[in-house]
Amino acid sequence: MGRTDLTPEQWAKLEPEWPGNSRHGHAYKPHLPVINGILWRLKTGAPWRDIPERYGPWETCWDRFTRWSRDGTWKRVLVALQVKEDAQGKIDWDGASLDSTSCKAHRAAVGARKQPAKLEKKGALNDEWLGISRGGRNSKIHVLTEGKRRPLAVLVSEGQASDPTYLLPLLDEVCIRRPGPGRPRKRPPMVRVDRAYGARKYRQQLRSRKIVCVCPERKDAKKARLKKGSRGGRPLKFDAEADKGRQVVECNINRLKDFRALATRYEKRGHQFLAVVHVACIVLWL
């Protein structure tokens, strides 16, 4: 058993979630060695062709990873794990925290088409989420984490994208169904964020969704308020004790970047890099 392979306990949780054989085409080869080969590649960041022979042909690993990234299988498996954990009351909704991180793009990630291929126009991809900022070509991953350092939702954007503009889209990604009747769980009661999200506009967006915003006051906002004197209003409420829990998202990002294929982007296509993020999230939920 390799260091990056799934343990028998982890595989027992995952085995019921994989798709079965379709009516057309050849049957799938056993999922376990193929998924272990995919994990080996994502953990090490090596080229697909260097996957060890014990996992089978590298073409099989690459084909299954790409196929499931196009049809949304990786995201569906991630949501299924979250539903199971929520049904057992193991998700810490009160400790939610939100932040983003940048991933530098390797030269192998450059050169994709600017417009999606015909087969991908059916999905929600509008670009490849690869931009140019001060650090060069990179992508940005936006993460909403629960209190146990596991991701509730992830989004990918261009590296030069502003963090707060993805606040609402990231919250919209949260949709955890309940085992019985009732609406799915879509929002945590409280979110801890840094000063980048501290503008009044974004505080109001969270307030409109009945989410408590734990964020220190921005220096420019404080300066403007004091300049107005009594007309500037009262200082914003800030729970310093609750803000200490914001480190959970930093720890979660560090754990995600243990996957070298995520810390450095090698995939040209946006849906493939998003699948890398989803696979890393699946392992963290195990």
Image: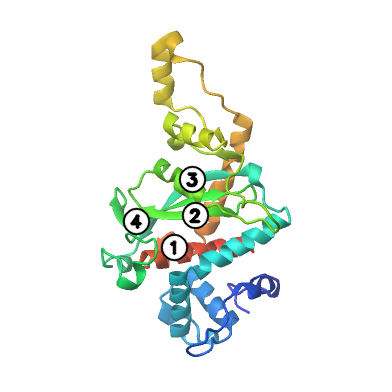
Where does the image place residue 200, in percent across and percent down from the top left?
A: 44, 29
The residue carrying mark 3 is: 99
Disc 3 is placed on an element classified as strand
Q: Is residue 222 above or below residue 118?
A: above
Q: Amino acid at mark 2?
A: Val
Seen in the image, is 131 located left or right of residue 30? left
The residue carrying mark 4 is: 138
Q: Identify the disc placed on residue 274.
A: 1
Who comes first in sequence, dot 4 or dot 2? 4
Dot 3 crowding, Cα within 10 Å, few <14, some 14–19, many 20+: many
The residue shown at (48%, 62%) is: 277
Q: Is residue 145 above or below residue 32?
A: above
Q: Give residue 126's quadrant in the image.
A: bottom left
* Distance Cα–Cα, label 1 vs label 2: 9 Å
Who comes first in sequence, dot 4 or dot 1? 4
* Distance Cα–Cα, label 1 vs label 3: 17 Å
Marks 1 and 4: in contact by CB < 8 Å?
A: no
Way the structure is coloured = rainbow
